[in-house]
Image (tube, rainbow, N blue to C red):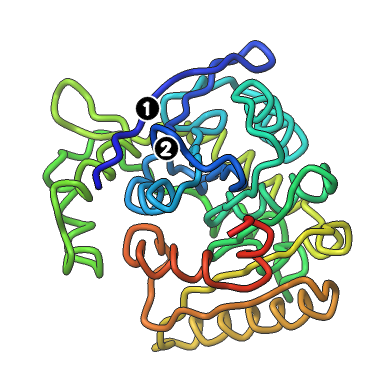
């Protein structure tokens, strides 16, 4: 079955937001709608391989471009979590998504965590896909300045399209490269008339989001969420001391999360890169729909 997405726009607090929706012609009314939230400097297209699987299972599945990203408007302000969450809440209301379950990737995981803490009675379940597993400000020995420097985006504007794609193909995704995957990558960035690419998220706005991530009280949010939480973690073998330290920090964060909220379920995906929705879409779909607390919350 091929389900073609519908693209559209909604207006929220003076801004225009782009969304993509996948759904059967007559989806089952009992199933909970899904809202898919991309990561930092990404776009709704990151879900192009996963969303059709949810739609085929009967879910009305909507992915959005958050402010500053994709085809949505790009103001110079409003990149704090409170404003982003309010954006998304207005989009949910305008699209008539009644109490959707939220699935967020990377920074998007932190967004849906804050959304569920802000609207605990309106969210039946959240899924954090390789994100929201630790609190930046709690990392030992780090300062805001160090975090800003470490997480600053690369400046790749003006890179030829072929060079940009070849860099991605040289990594793990190159082993499963398809025209569809290439199309996703070219929608995440801006493709210029001279056949070069540039980020859609402005550099300064990217840094504003990193600063907001530093300020987010991630662990406190877990205390405020009342619905089931599924955390899916991508794991690879550590080959450097820095990677081992990062893994240790994440494992400590995961242990703390489980101690804070008994509704947390953690699933680890070995031999998997950060971009789980692109590398393992079928496995991601299965983990979400077959995990008992989430399955029940989605009315499967």
Q: In which quarter of the view is residue 260 placed? A: bottom right
The image shows residue 179 at horizontal and vertical percentages of 13, 47
Left or right of residue 160: residue 211: right
Residue at figure coordinates x 63%, y 60% from the top left: 146
* Mark 2, other Cα within 10 Å: few <14 / some 14–19 / many ≥20: many
Left or right of residue 57: residue 257: right
Q: Are discs 1 and 2 less than 8 Å apart at CB?
A: yes
In what quadrant of the picture does the C terminus appear?
bottom right
Foreground residue, 43 or 240? 43
Residue at figure coordinates x 57%, y 29% from the top left: 67
Q: Which SS class for mark 2?
A: loop
Name the N-terminal-most of marks 1 and 2.
1
The image shows residue 139 at horizontal and vertical percentages of 72, 71
Q: In which quarter of the view is residue 237 placed? A: bottom left
Q: CA–CA distance between discs 1 and 2?
A: 9 Å
Rendered position, 61 above or below 290: above
Give the label on residue 23, or none: 2
Give the label on residue 6, or none: 1
Q: In which quarter of the view is residue 100 placed? A: top right
Residue at figure coordinates x 11%, y 44% from the top left: 162
Residue at figure coordinates x 61%, y 52% from the top left: 148
């Amino acid at each position: 079955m091929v389900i073609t997405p519908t693209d559209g726009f909604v207006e929220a607090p003076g801004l225009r937001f782009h969304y993509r929706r996948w759904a059967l012609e007559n989806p089952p009314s009992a199933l909970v709608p899904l809202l898919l939230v991309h990561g930092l400097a990404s776009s709704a297209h990151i879900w192009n391989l996963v969303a059709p699987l949810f739609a085929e299972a009967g879910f009305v599945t909507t992915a959005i471009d958050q402010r500053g990203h994709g085809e949505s408007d790009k103001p110079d302000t409003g990149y704090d979590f409170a404003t982003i969450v309010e954006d998304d809440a207005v989009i949910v209301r305008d699209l008539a998504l009644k109490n959707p379950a939220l699935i967020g990737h990377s920074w998007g995981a932190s967004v849906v965590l804050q959304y569920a803490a802000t609207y605990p009675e309106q969210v039946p379940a959240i899924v954090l896909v390789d994100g929201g597993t630790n609190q930046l400000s709690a990392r030992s020995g780090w300062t805001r300045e160090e975090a800003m420097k470490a997480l600053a985006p690369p400046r790749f504007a003006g890179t030829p399209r072929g060079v940009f794609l070849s860099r991605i193909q040289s990594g793990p995704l190159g082993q499963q490269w398809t025209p569809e995957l290439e199309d996703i990558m070219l929608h995440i960035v801006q493709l210029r008339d001279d056949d070069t690419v540039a980020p859609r998220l402005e550099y300064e706005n990217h840094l504003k989001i990193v600063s907001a991530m530093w300020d987010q009280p991630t662990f406190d949010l877990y205390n405020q969420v009342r619905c089931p939480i599924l955390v899916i973690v991508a794991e690879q073998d550590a080959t450097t001391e820095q990677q081992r330290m990062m893994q240790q920090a994440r494992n400590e964060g995961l242990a703390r999360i489980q101690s804070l909220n008994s509704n947390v379920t953690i699933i680890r995906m070995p031999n998997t890169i950060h971009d789980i929705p692109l590398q393992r879409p079928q496995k991601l779909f299965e983990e979400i729909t077959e995990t008992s607390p989430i399955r029940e919350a989605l009315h499967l």
